Image (cartoon, rainbow, N blue to C red):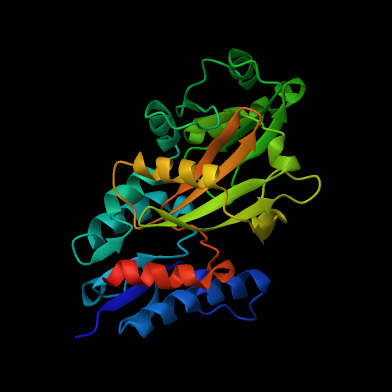
Amino acid sequence: MSVRIALVNDHRWIAPIDPDDYARRILTEDALVGEALRHRGAVVERVVWSDSEVDWAAFDIALIRQTWDYFERYPEFLAWLARVDGLTRIVNPAPLLRWNADKRYLIELAEAGVPIVPTRRILRGDADRTLAEWMDCDAMACCVIKPSVSGGGRETWRIERAQAEAHEARWQGLVAAEDMLIQPFLPEITSAGEVSLMLINGEVTHAVRKTARAGEFRVQDDHGGSVAAEPLDPALSALARRVVAAVPFWPLYARVDLVETERGALLMELELIEPEFFYRFCPEAAERLAEALLF
């Protein structure tokens, strides 16, 4: 009997009407994964994670793809994970998805010896210090603030120390609503961008470099960033493998986002839930994913 696999998306990416370049890239990537799985005898269907009509028990595997609204519907997504986890095999595993959804994992990885961008986590409701005071604690001339649970650059702001007081109302509103992270702004982000390395079963398959558009520091497509294939660098590949080895649950797939600095490469983020995997730059990686998933 054929293995039935759900490619799990959010509602925007199943059948977009008049898709733009961004949506077409998503459809292309899912097609590469789907064809690699079908080539190995699997039955593949693209489904919406939040669709109450989906019979998850009818699938042998639920492969997370573009669930890019999960952080906007976080309690609902966690409840979905808890419900579906007993009905089918979720990949990556549900405990790993829960661990990776909150960026406090960066602090845990740092404690395990992984070099990260220095990160301070401020708990929701902590109004003991102003943003300027937090910046002064770590001697930051410029910082980046972001929610601990987020994606796509949501509520991510670059703030100069001289402008901290002007952003205090925004900061207080954000930290009243959710846990927040404060990190130093690294100028290498705007000068050289991020290097993303893709791994399947702990082995690096390919890499891309993501760069921000002029006047922006966020590298995501949503904010005008661009992506190009990047040759594999042995030192960065070794660091990516080290990052994945420090994770408490083994991931089938992982994307490791690094920034190269004068102090060496630092982990920006580790994407284990629904990373854009840039299969279009390396279709062979989709074949390797299918092989690892099914055999």
Residue at 57% across / 77% down in the picture? 16
Query: Foreground: 254 or 168?
Result: 254
Asked whether residue 232 appears in the rendered view, the answer is yes
Which residue, as the protein is rendered here, is positioned at the far right? 214
Query: Foreground: 15 or 35?
Result: 35
Q: How many marks?
A: 0
Up/down of 154 relative to 184, above or below: below
Is 272 positioned to the left or the right of 81 in the image? right
Residue at 37% across / 84% down in the picture? 39
Asked whether residue 48 appears in the rendered view, the answer is no
Is 163 positioned to the left or the right of 62 in the image? right
Residue at 19% across / 86% down in the picture? 1
Residue at 61% across / 40% down in the picture? 259
Q: Position of residue 292 (x, y in %)?
A: 32, 66
Query: Foreground: 131 or 25?
Result: 25
Q: Quadrant of residue 160?
A: top right
Q: Position of residue 200 (x, y in %)?
A: 40, 59
Q: Position of residue 80 (x, y in %)?
A: 31, 59
Which residue, as the protein is rendered here, is positioned at the far front? 234
Is 6 positioned to the left or the right of 71 in the image? left
Q: Position of residue 224 (x, y in %)?
A: 72, 56
Q: Quadrant of residue 82?
A: bottom left
Tell me the quadrant of the picture where the C terminus can be found. bottom left
Query: Foreground: 285 or 175?
Result: 285
